[in-house]
Every structure is written in C-alpha cells, then in structure tokens.
Image (cartoon, coloured by chain):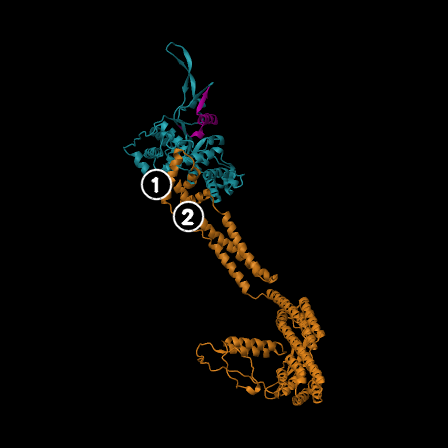
Chain colours: A cyan, B orange
Amino acid sequence: MARAATEIPGDMKPERFQELATTIETELGKVMVGQAEVIRLVLMAMIAGGHVLLEGVPGLGKTVLVRSLGGVLHLDFARVQFTPDLMPADITGTHIVTEDESGRRRFDFQAGPLFTNLLLADEINRATPKTQSALLEAMQERQVTVGDRTRALPDPFFVLATQNPIELEGTYPLPEAQLDRFFFKIVVPFPDAEDLAEIARRTTGAENAELRPVAAGDELASMAALAREVPVATAVMERAVQIVLGTHPDREHAPEAVRRYVRWGSSPRGLQTLILGGRIRALLDGRFNVAHDDVAAVAPAALRHRVFLNFEADAAGVGSDQVVSAVLESVAQRQ
Amino acid sequence: MTGIREFLGRARTRILGRRAVTWAARGALVGAGAAAVSELAFRQWPVDPTWPVLAACALTGVLVAATGWVRAWPSWPEVARLADLNLGGKERLATALEYSTFDGYLPARQRFDTERWIATADLKALLPGRWPVRVAAAAVAAFLIAVALALAPNPALDRVRLEHQAQAAQQKAAADVAKLAQQEATARAGEDPAKRQALEQALQKAAQAVKNAPDATSAVAALSQAQNQIQALSDPTVHTRQQAASAAGQALASQPNLAQKAGQALAQQDNRGAAQQLQQLGQQLASMSATDRQALANQLAQAAQAAQAGDPKLAQSLQQAADALRSGDTAAAQAALNQAAQQLNQLAGQQQFEGDAAQAINRLQNDKTPLEQAAQAEQAAQGQGQGQGQGQGQGRGQGQGQGQGQGQGQGQGQGQGQGQGQGQGQGQGQGQGTGGNGSGGGSGGNGQKPAAGNDKVYVPSQSQPTGQGTQVGSNQGQDSQLVPYTQVIADYKAQAVDQVDRQVLPQSERDLVQQYFSDLGS
C-alpha cells in the first residue's frame, strides 16, 4: 500500500544488496582472518547507520578492520588514539588565527578528525569523560558545536571505537547513556590456531593484500533504505519487545539471571537495534522478512552493552552475554 | 497469495486433526477418570442404576473433548506461526499472511519467496512427535481401573440393587393384585354376592398392603394373609356336592330317555346345562306317558340315591320329583325339578367362585415368589439371619374320580415360611367311581398321505372329546377341516393351563403340566 510493487527503495535490489555485502566481506576477509562474524556485524551496523564499539585485546586487527573498511567503502578515514590528555578540541577542531595575503588576521575553523566518514576512536575509554562526551555528542547528533557555531559532520559518519578489556588501570569507563549510543558492541574473539597461522602467513610474507573499493557511501545509504523496508511480522516484533523487557529485573517474566544480576535493562534503542539489525540480517541471508532467528542472532551485540550488571554479577563472574542468553532462552520457551 | 492460503488451509487441517486426537485423548482421560472416581464413590455412596452416572462421565469427556477442540481451533496467524515453527519457515508464512494486503516491493518479493519456499516444504513434518501418548496412556489406565472397579464386587451397590429389585417386585405385585381385584369384582349368577365382595375386598386390601409395605418380607406377609382370607371363603362341600351331582347325572344318563341329556350334562359337570335340561324336562312331564313317567321316576329316584351322600338337598329335590311322578302329580314333579335345577345353578355359581378364589390364591402365590426371593436376597446381603420368621400354611384337598370307577384323592398343601416359619398343609381326598368318559376321535380315511419327515402333522379341528363312553373309538372319521398340529397343541395347552390355574395345586405340579405340553409341542 505504501509503495507500488515495482518501485525499489533507493534503487537497491535485494540481490544487489547481498552482492555488495558479500563483496565487502570478501574484501575485508583478505586482511581479517577468522573474524567473519565481526566483519558481518560491523557491516550490519554501518548499513544501519550505527556506530560500533569493538572490544578486544590488542593485536586482533581492530584498527586494520576499520582502516580496511575505509578503503573498501571508499570512505574518508581518520584515526584518533584516545589518551587521558586528549581534549575535545583535539577531535572536534578549533579556531586558529590565520593571516591572509593582505596580512589581515582572522580566526578560521580548523576541523578536527571527527570531520570524516569513518572514524576509528582507538581505546576510547582512555580519554577523559569530557572528551568522550564530545565524541558521543557527535555520534548522536552527527554534528559538532565549536564556539557559537554548529557544523554538520560528513555523511555517512561512522564511529568505530575500540576498548581494551584488560588494561583498565587509568581508564574512564563509558557511562551507560553513552554506551547506549553504540549500535553494536562487538567482542573481537581471539583467533584459533589455524587462523593464527594464517595471520602469520599473510602478514610476514612479501605480498600484501590489496583492497579495492567496492562500494560508496551512497550505496550504503541505499542499502539502509532497502533494509528499513523489510517486513516484520507482529509475532517477531512482539518477541523482540519481550526480549528487551526481559532484560529488566522488575518485569514479570524476567528470568532469574536478570532478577539476580541486572541493575538496569536495555533502553528502547535496544529494541530499535534488534529490529533494524534483524532486517539487515534477513536481507543478507537472502530472505525478505525478519525471523526470530535474526533477532536472536543480533541480540548479543545489540544488548550486551545495554544491560548493566550489578556487583553480584561481578562477584559471580557473570557477564552480560550470559544474561542476554538467559533472556533469549526464556522468551523462546515462553512463546 | 492463493498458494499460501491453500498451504495454510492444509496446514490447518493437519493441526486440527492433531488437536482432535489430543483433545480426544484428554476427553477420554476426563471421562475415564470421572468414571473411575465414580466407581470408587459408588462403594461409599452407592447409586443404582449406575449407568446414568457413567453416561454422564462419558458425556463429560465428550464435551471436554469437543469444547477443547473447538476452542483450540487455530486462527490463520496461529497456523502460520505453527507452520513456520515446525517446518523451519523462518516466519515466512506469518509475515506473508500479515503483509498480504501490502503492495510494496519487498512485501511482494516476500510473498514470492514464501510461495517458493512452500514448494519445498513438507507438511508431514508439521507437529512432529506430539502424539498425546501420555494422556492416552493415562486415559486407558483410568478406563481399566474403572472397568476393574465396576467388575469387582460392590457390597454397598448390591444392597441397593436388591432393595430396588424388592421395591420393583413389590410394586409389580401390588399392581397385579389390584388388577386381580378388578377382575374378581364381577359376580356370577348363582354365587354368594357377599363372598364375591369379601374376595374383592381381600384382594384390594392386599394390593394396598403390598404397595405400602416397608419391605419385601412385609409384602409377603400381606399376600399370605390375603391368601388365608380367600382360602377361608372357600366352601369345602362344593366338591362333595359336585361329585354327588355327577353321580346323579350318571344315574340319569343310564337310560335313553328325556332325562338322559340332563344326566349327561351333570356327569360332565355342566351344572347349568343340566339345570336347563331339568327345567325342560319338567315342562315335558305333562305330555309324557305314564310308562315314561314311571321310568323317569325310577331314574330320578336312583339319581337321588346317588346324590344322597354328597348333596342331600339335591337328592331331596330329585326324590320329591320322583315321588310326585309316581303319584301322577306332574306339577309337583315339575316344581321339584325346578328346585333341583336351581340348586344346580347355585352349585355352578359356587364352583365358579371356588375357581376364582383358587385362581386368586395362585396369582397371589405367583406374586409372592419374586418377593420371597428378594426378601431372602436382602437378608443374605445384609448378612443378618432373622431369628424369627413367618409361618404360613395353606392346605386344600381335592379329590377327583375318573375313569374306571377308581377315585383318586389328592391332598395338597402348601407351606411356606421364612426363618422359623412353618408351613402347614392339609389334604383331603375323595374318590368316587363314575362312568368313564370316553373320548372319541379319529379322522376318516380321506386319502391324505401320512405325515413323514418334516411334514406338518394335521389333526381334525374338532378335537374336543365328544364321544360317549360307549362309543370309544367307534365314531367315524369326518372330513372336517384340518388345522396344524402345533396349533391344536397350543389350544390344548391353553385350556389345560387355565384349568390348572383354577385349582390350588403346588407349583411343581403346575410346572409338570406346562412341561408336558411343551414337550408335545416340540
């Protein structure tokens, strides 16, 4: 009813959608060994127009992934190493005094690294909350305000932030409200033996993998537009709602793990992420509707940073992934 | 979308079939469980008959099954959801159904994708492994328990059933006796109206007493009392008088004159016919010759002598007639014969009453039998031996002479009692020799071939004995209409049973008669 049957959203056909995604994944697979799931989740987040928080120990290729993405997608790329002395102006930009040919001096805005399409915020938790807030404002509003002027960021604008889960000394954990602004939180797993050997072969030899740009930013926008048209059955929507509600310990059907270990459950952004992520995953899977499996598949990445655990969970060694799994199991059994 | 709808329709049929099985099993479990519980309850709180309760249990099971099945009727979204879930449709069907009216590009592609998936889907995999085995097993177990409980002895239920049987027998006996009272209410000519009224009242009272009796034993007692009352109405001299009348009849029938018909009727105990013949004889006296009058007077005197011992009044009337004839006073003779006819009519009426009374006693006895059995069963079920019982006795003597002048007397008595009851019987027997009644019969040779094999055997329709004693086997066969042998036997049997029923005889003797004719018939 909303659209004629022959009209294609953003002129992007599902087949092209799949082809592009596969090509991007293939290209990224040249430099990222054994991280297919991470690549797919990052790609999904970018199609959705969301930002990604990558968590993993150093040396797993997080920076390589982001840099490669910029090359494959033909997007501008910038990298900022967050440190405790990093100031907001260091990332947003600042006014500097310049002198023109006539010798007149004036303040010109010198754009910071935020003014790019693809920003790698490396070890974001090492910056002070003040700087983190400046970045997070830009992530949400897709604009920065310097002085009395607000400037829009380039479109598309993606932030891929990383954080190290082991070196927590001297870090500033991201507040809950700021974590909520990341579309996915992706845990980068340590490669297995086979993948490690492959990494060694690829990075220590004479040949370097050459990436070719296979898509542009406007095609990402078309992919996003198509994904938003994917039908979602009421039952699937209701189950996604139940999953989100199930992360709240005060809800009737919350599982025992949630009641015991969760301090605060997912925000509505979690539901939006579940549905949108499910839509994209369905298209990537060659389907034209969202399945329960799609929602369940994206749930860990969508909810693990939106479920806030209490001290008892820390003491018991229970992570948010376990809680999310309990919620998924509970909801599936109930329905 | 047509393909999707058609697929969903087939899926719904399968789901409904599976749910029908499921709910049938649940209904069976409910019904069988309720029956088992009912059977258990019957042991504490017996109900008779039990079939309405068990039928209600079965009906409850059916209702549960039907209601559950109807309530479980799946909607289209539910069908789609179940098909997706069990066939791995990844919500294709649910989405296609929900977006069936959407015209967008992706909804259209989604429907197409769903139809393509349907072509590969196997509906047989719908709801795999969900047969209600446990519920069905529980239903079977409950059913077996219910059957076992139903077959196992239930003393409480047996007691109730015996009570109901006793009540039914009581009601039936009361109805029979009331009906009998109505039948016996009609008085016949020549009998004592007071006795008839007493008989009717005794029966009515017995019917009321049986109806209101608190138990079968009391009802039996009421019937026994009625039997005694009716028995008391009997006149023991009736048989003696009948024998006397028969003897007088044989004396009158000895000579072939105008009194012969009256004598034959008397000899055959047709007292009313004999009375009519005597009246006619009295009217013909005036036209008789002196010789005939003398001969008739002698016959009457002989008849009076024959009747003297058993019926002095009849003998006196006959003797008066004989004397009057000898003296030539035909008017006085006619008056005496009319008086004798009147006495014979009274005798006929009294005989009729005696027969009715005996029939009433027998009917009461028939009604008593099931009541006695019920009372005994009740007592046995209660396990209580009665320390005292009722003693009832009836006795009556009958004597009948037949044939070659040899009288046979039968004394019969019936005594029945329960517990410590005693039965008493009295018997009387009288025998008197009279002329034998011959039976004449036989069929003429009409060329009919003899019966053989499975052919039906026919006998003449005039099967009643009509011959005289002097004509035994001498009358010629007649070309009369033939009737089937079995029909004749049935007629004989009906007559015999009716006659036996009008005599006070032991049940075993009556059964013997029945058996005799049954054997003939077979």
Q: Which residues are magenta?
A: A119-146
The residue pinned by badge 2 equals B126
Give the x, y percent position of residue B450.
45, 80
Give the x, y percent position of residue B318.
69, 86
Kindly identify the amino acid type of the residue bearing the numbered disc 2. Leu
Kindly identify the amino acid type of the residue bearing the numbered disc 1. Ala
* B72 in magenta: no
Give the x, y percent position of residue B145.
53, 61
Which of the chains bears the disc numbered 1? A
Q: Secondary structure at mark 2?
A: loop
Whether residue A34 is visible, yes or no, is yes
Q: Nearer the viewer, residue B262 or B486?
A: B262
Which of the chains bears the disc numbered 2? B
Q: Nearer the viewer, mark 1 or mark 2?
A: 2
Instruction: Indicate the quadrant where residue A220 lies.
Output: top left
Kindly give the residue lying farthest to the top in the view shown. Answer: A102
- Give the number of callouts: 2
Give the x, y percent position of residue B43.
59, 62
Q: Is residue B363 left or right of residue A218?
A: right
The residue pinned by badge 1 equals A193
Q: Is residue A321 left or right of residue B339?
A: left
Q: Is residue B503 above or below residue A244?
A: below
* A126 in magenta: yes
Q: Is residue B463 left or right of residue A149?
A: right
Q: Nearer the viewer, residue B23 or B392?
A: B392
Tell me the CA gap for discs 1 and 2: 42 Å
Q: Nearer the viewer, residue B314 or A178?
A: B314
Q: Residues within 10 Å of mark 1 (few under 14, many from 20)?
A: few
Q: Is residue B323 above or below residue B31?
A: below
